[in-house]
Image (tube, grey):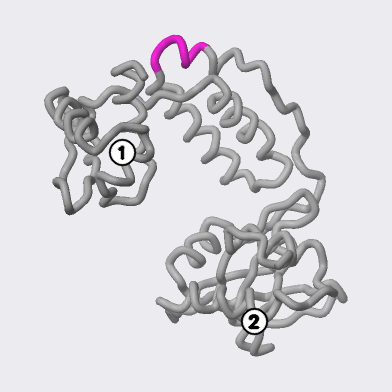
């Protein structure tokens, strides 16, 4: 492997893997011996990379404006562009705008040749925006409540057109072509419920936190849903997205 490619692979591993990363893991990722890895770490440091740590403790990359921009393969660039172009089918306007802004910042840091590839990609998605009704409530507030583990109060119109007041612990959101769903622990029903976001009439924070219970609640949800063959496709999709694994097929 060429020295430049080896160093680029090492930088990518340091950026991608949860720190601190052991020398053994980095050597395996880059396909070199531990001795060669230590030399490559020294080379990167001499070139201006800020890498904390040492042998036996693990390494952590501290990003620095002096570091060269990240590099992507042509297929990775195509995949990023395709994903952002396809987002209008499932995302709300704020999420679509955030994705486009993020891609623009990534492209701005690419070397000139790769920036041109991002502009003239061969794979494009010209899918129109979703025809499903968009939510009318503040989705940014709901997303933040999921991240911050804050309870929210909903006025909700269910699929039978009944209107109820709910206080929930929001756990995460699932984006699909058919529905935008919010999973939460409903205090009124004392159980997990899926809420169609376009049926939420109003939403506000209650001022109550359920930190740090999100992971435990998701684990409980997985256990409850795993052996339910009657579960609908939307709930199955949401479970896969929110947990990161296809638990329903076990």
Rendered position, 135 above or below 188:
above
Q: What is the magenta segment's predominant secondary structure?
A: helix
Q: Is residue 207 visible?
A: no
| Picture residue at 66% right of the left edge, 46% below the top | 91
Callout 1: 10 Å neighbours few (<14), some, many (20+)? some
Rendered position, 75 above or below 226:
above
Residue designated by label 1: 27
| Picture residue at 75% right of the left edge, 78% below the top | 227
Residue projecting furthest to the right: 160
Task: Give the foreground label among 1 and 2.
Answer: 1
The secondary element bearing badge 2 is classed as: strand
Which portion, as a residue range, is magenta? Answer: 111-116
Is residue 83 magenta-colored? no
Residue designated by label 2: 166
Rendered position, 110 above or below 245:
above
Question: Could you tell whether 10 is left or right of 51 in the image?
Answer: right
Dividing the picture into quarters, in which one does residue 172 lie? bottom right
């Amino acid at each position: 492997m060429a020295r430049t490619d080896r160093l680029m692979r090492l930088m990518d591993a340091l950026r991608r893997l949860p720190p601190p990363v052991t020398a053994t893991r980095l050597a395996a990722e880059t396909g070199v011996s531990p001795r060669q890895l230590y030399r490559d770490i020294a080379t990167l440091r001499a070139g201006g990379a800020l890498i904390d740590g040492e042998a036996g403790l693990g390494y952590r990359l501290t990003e620095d404006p002096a570091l060269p921009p990240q590099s992507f393969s042509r297929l990775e660039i195509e995949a990023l562009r395709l994903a952002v172009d396809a987002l209008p089918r499932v995302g709300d306007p704020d999420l679509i705008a955030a994705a486009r802004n993020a891609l623009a910042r990534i492209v701005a840091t690419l070397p000139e040749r790769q920036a041109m590839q991002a502009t003239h990609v061969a794979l494009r998605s010209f899918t129109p925006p979703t025809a499903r009704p968009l939510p009318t409530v503040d989705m940014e507030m709901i997303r933040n409540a999921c991240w911050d583990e804050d309870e929210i109060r909903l006025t909700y119109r269910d699929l039978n057109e009944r209107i109820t007041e709910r206080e929930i612990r929001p756990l995460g959101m699932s984006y699909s072509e058919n529905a935008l769903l919010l999973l939460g622990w409903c205090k009124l029903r004392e159980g997990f419920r899926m809420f169609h976001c376009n049926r939420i009439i109003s939403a506000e924070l209650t001022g109550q936190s359920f930190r740090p219970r999100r992971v435990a609640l998701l684990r409980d949800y997985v256990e409850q849903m795993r052996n339910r063959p009657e579960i609908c496709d939307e709930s199955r999709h949401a479970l896969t997205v929110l947990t990161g694994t296809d638990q329903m097929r076990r």
